[in-house]
Image (cartoon, rainbow, N blue to C red):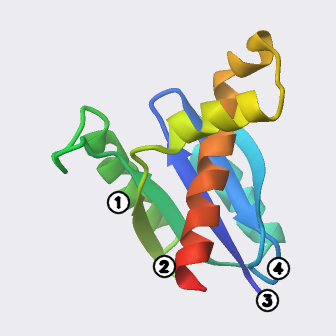
Amino acid sequence: MPRILAIDYGLKRTGIAVTDPLQIIATGLTTVESPKLIPFLKDYFSKEIVELIIIGEPKNWDDTDTHATPLVKKIIERLKKEFPAIPLTTVDERYTSKMASQAMIDMGMKKMQRRNKALVDEIAATIMLQEYLQRMS
């Protein structure tokens, strides 16, 4: 079975998570520098079959756009152009970074490890993907 890939896109870094082939478990894949996202995905898609991309859509508490929303909309258009055969859907990412930070605390990570923004982004993408899987089951 093909995988589902999740993207937590940011100005500097992008966290990426992916499901197992049975689409049961979400696992953090990596964090890439945002300008290198498309080449990374081209390489990944040449090795793995992905049937869906989900990307976090930044929103404020009142559902208005954040300062990051236009940036995410721009990368969504680029992803659709670069990978037209792979459907893309957006998911609410409002609490994922906070949840990722809390998960790192719960895992007993030291303060220095929790300052690793790349790891926070990867965990946030994993949380988005796991929530998506739970909603779909």
Ranked by sequence position, the earlier of labels 3 and 4 is 3
Give me the C-alpha separation between circle 3 and circle 4: 5 Å
Give me the C-alpha separation between circle 4 and circle 1: 26 Å
Identify residue type, mark 2.
Answer: Pro
Identify residue type, mark 1.
Answer: Glu
Q: Residues within 10 Å of mark 4 (few under 14, many from 20)?
A: some
Circle 2/circle 1 CB separation < 8 Å: no
Circle 3/circle 1 CB separation < 8 Å: no
Q: What residue do we see at 66% from left, 57% from top? A: 41
Instruction: Judge whether 9 appears above or below 82 on screen.
Output: above
x then y, percent, for residue 40: 69, 49
Ranked by sequence position, the earlier of labels 3 and 1 is 3
Q: What residue do we see at 24% from left, 37% from top? A: 66
Ranked by sequence position, the earlier of labels 2 and 1 is 1
Label 4's element? loop
Q: Which residue is mark 4?
A: 21
Give me the C-alpha separation between circle 2 and circle 3: 16 Å
Identify residue type, mark 4.
Answer: Pro
* Comparing labels 3 and 1, the label whose residue is closer to the camera: 3
Q: Residues within 10 Å of mark 1 (few under 14, many from 20)?
A: few
Circle 3/circle 4 CB separation < 8 Å: yes
Q: Which residue is mark 3?
A: 1
Label 2's element? loop
Label 1's element? helix
Q: Which residue is mark 2?
A: 87
Give me the C-alpha separation between circle 2 and circle 1: 12 Å
x then y, percent, for residue 83: 53, 70
Q: Which residue is mark 1?
A: 77
Give me the C-alpha separation between circle 3 and circle 1: 26 Å
